[in-house]
Amino acid sequence: MKVSAIVPAYNEEMRIKNVLEPLSKSSMITNVIVIDDGSRDHTALIATEYNNTTVIQLPENRGKAEAIKRGLEGCDGEIILFLDADLVGLTEEHIEDLILPLLQENIEMTVGIFESGRTITNLAQKIAPNLSGQRAFKRHLARDILNLNMSGYSLEVALSKYIKENCITTKQVMLKDISHVMKEEKLGLTKGMVWRLKMYKDILKYWLN
């Protein structure tokens, strides 16, 4: 069973190793596709250090949804795994937890939910668990996901609507002791809040369409 991991990344040179290291060590992962979404740092260079990793560089920042689509276009895994590039505490066990239900149960997609990581990220996922970026799914869903009308930061919302409207069988998987770095921490409070407002705008725009 071929399992492909897709990691969209934008200016994550300080963090992406925390994701690529466990992916490279996992016996379940066949290949990794990193989409460098117009980064201005060494994200792409660091990703090339890993033998099982293909790096796709976008000339400018297009947003997570577009990066994911580019990754799917170059992906041939029978199971596809989405992971954010800024995860803190990711382990091989977390990767297995997301993939195994697809092999052992009648499940089409898993959704990873942070637990016992950091209070702020735990709370965010309790409020909106379907907005998690950590997912694994079977190959037959890839074409539908590619054809979703999504842009910017609306990826998780688009997936949630798709799941509901098409009765896709999903399972929430608790990922213990894991979190991610908030945009306010990466960019500073002001820039981080501007980014967050843009994200909420994209999400709201998608839901209202």
Image: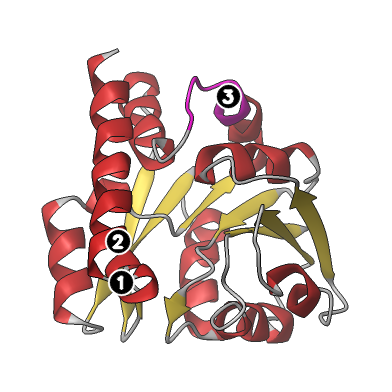
Q: How crowded is mark 2: few (under 14 residues within 10 Å), some or many (20 or more)?
A: some
Residue 120 higher or lower than 106, as above or below: below
The amino acid at mark 3 is Asp
Q: Which mark is residue 144?
A: 3
Name the mark nearer the viewer: 3 or 2. Answer: 2
Q: Which mark is residue 49?
A: none
The amino acid at mark 1 is Gly
Front residue of 186/51: it is: 186
Front residue of 73/162: it is: 73
Residue 185 higher or lower than 197, as above or below: below
Q: What element carries label 1?
A: loop
State the image coordinates of residue 154 (x, y, percent, origin top left).
39, 35
Q: Is mark 3 on a helix, strand or loop?
A: helix
Q: How crowded is mark 1: few (under 14 residues within 10 Å), some or many (20 or more)?
A: few
Are the residues at dot 2 and dot 1 in contact (C-beta closer than 8 Å)?
yes
Q: Is residue 64 magenta?
A: no
State the image coordinates of residue 193 (x, y, percent, origin top left).
23, 56
Q: How far apart are marks 3 and 2 (CA)?
A: 32 Å
The amino acid at mark 2 is Gly
- Which region is colored magenta? 144-151
Name the mark nearer the viewer: 3 or 1. Answer: 1
Q: Mark 1 points at which residue?
A: 188
Q: In percent of the image, x 24 and y 62: which residue is there?
A: 190
Q: In percent of the image, x 39 and y 30: which residue is there?
A: 158
Q: In percent of the image, x 38 and y 42: which residue is there?
A: 156
Considering every residue shown, the one lying at the far front of the view is 190
Q: Mark 2 points at which residue?
A: 192
State the image coordinates of residue 186 (x, y, percent, origin top left).
39, 73
Q: Which quadrant of the rendered structure holds the N terminus?
A: bottom right
